Image: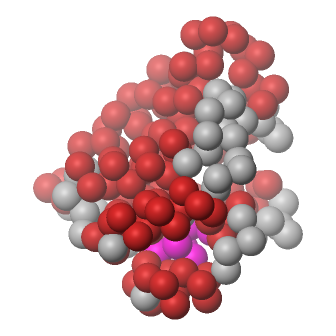
């Protein structure tokens, strides 16, 4: 399943680039999947890590994900997929709510995604300074609110012994970037 999801996501994102670094977009879902795999998550979660942006950012549908990878992977991807018809604030509020109330696996995918995104921001801050915030539809204050809200809610309902180590890395990086 790992290699199939990797190949599927790479093909789906093949023409896309990351908005900050300009590198091939696939580097992002690959990084997310590796964080999940390294934290010991099962294959379905790692596959969802590879696929977390394909429905949101490509013509691929949830039905295609379900047909190729099964219901569990499709549901994990669905829990992370934003409805682009909603406002930015509504979409981000929904993600924060999923982080607050979701399963460990749902939270793990979202936090891995946000950690990788914030690592790109940190890299860009070192070379571009505050100009990095112009890459986002919403600037610094909105990005700060969103990331800090993820941190404030990501531990909700989890036992200390089940929290992946990268959650703490995300909290520390969020503090570094925004404070």
Left-right relation of 24 to 171 = right
**In the image shown, does 143 or 75 lie closer to the viewer?**
75
Q: Quadrant of the N terminus?
A: bottom left
Q: Is residue 60 on the magenta stretch?
A: no
Rendering coords of residue 127 (x, y %): 63, 9
Q: Residue at x 54, y 62 (%)?
A: 9
Q: Is residue 45 above or below residue 135?
A: below
Rendering coords of residue 54 (x, y %): 62, 65
**Whether residue 94 is visible:** no
Picture quarter containing residue 2? bottom left
Q: Is residue 16 above or below residue 103?
A: above
Rendering coords of residue 4 (x, y %): 41, 70
Q: Is residue 6 above or below residue 18?
A: below
Left-right relation of 105 to 135 = left
**Whether residue 33 is visible:** yes
The scheme the figure's colours follow is secondary structure
Q: Residue at x 59, y 61 (%)?
A: 11
Q: Is residue 109 above or below residue 63?
A: above
Q: Which residues are magenta?
A: 76-82
**In the image shown, does 155 or 109 lie closer to the viewer?**
109
Q: Residue at x 67, y 74 (%)?
A: 60
Total marks in image? 0
| SS assignment for the magenta stretch, majority | helix
**In the image shown, does 33 or 85 lie closer to the viewer?**
33
Picture quarter containing residue 65? bottom right
Q: Residue at x 77, y 55 (%)?
A: 89
**In the image shown, does 152 or 44 lie closer to the viewer?**
44
Q: Quadrant of the C terminus?
A: top right
Picture quarter containing residue 37? bottom left
């Amino acid at each position: 399943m790992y290699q199939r999801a990797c190949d599927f996501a790479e093909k789906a994102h093949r023409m896309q680039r990351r908005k900050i670094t300009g590198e091939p977009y696939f580097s992002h879902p690959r990084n997310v999947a590796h964080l999940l795999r390294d934290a010991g998550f099962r294959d379905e979660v790692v596959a969802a890590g590879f696929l977390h942006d394909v429905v949101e950012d490509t013509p691929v549908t949830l039905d295609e994900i379900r047909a190729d990878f099964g219901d569990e992977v499709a549901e994990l991807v669905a829990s992370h997929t934003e409805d682009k018809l909603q406002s930015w604030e509504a979409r981000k509020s929904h993600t924060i709510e999923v982080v607050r109330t979701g399963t460990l696996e749902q939270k793990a995918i979202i936090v891995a995604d946000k950690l990788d995104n914030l690592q790109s921001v940190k890299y860009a801050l070192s070379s571009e300074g505050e100009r990095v915030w112009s890459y986002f539809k919403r600037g610094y204050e909105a990005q700060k609110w969103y990331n800090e809200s993820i941190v404030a809610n990501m531990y909700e309902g989890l036992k200390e012994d089940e929290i992946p180590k990268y959650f703490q890395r995300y909290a520390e990086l969020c503090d570094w970037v925004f404070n």
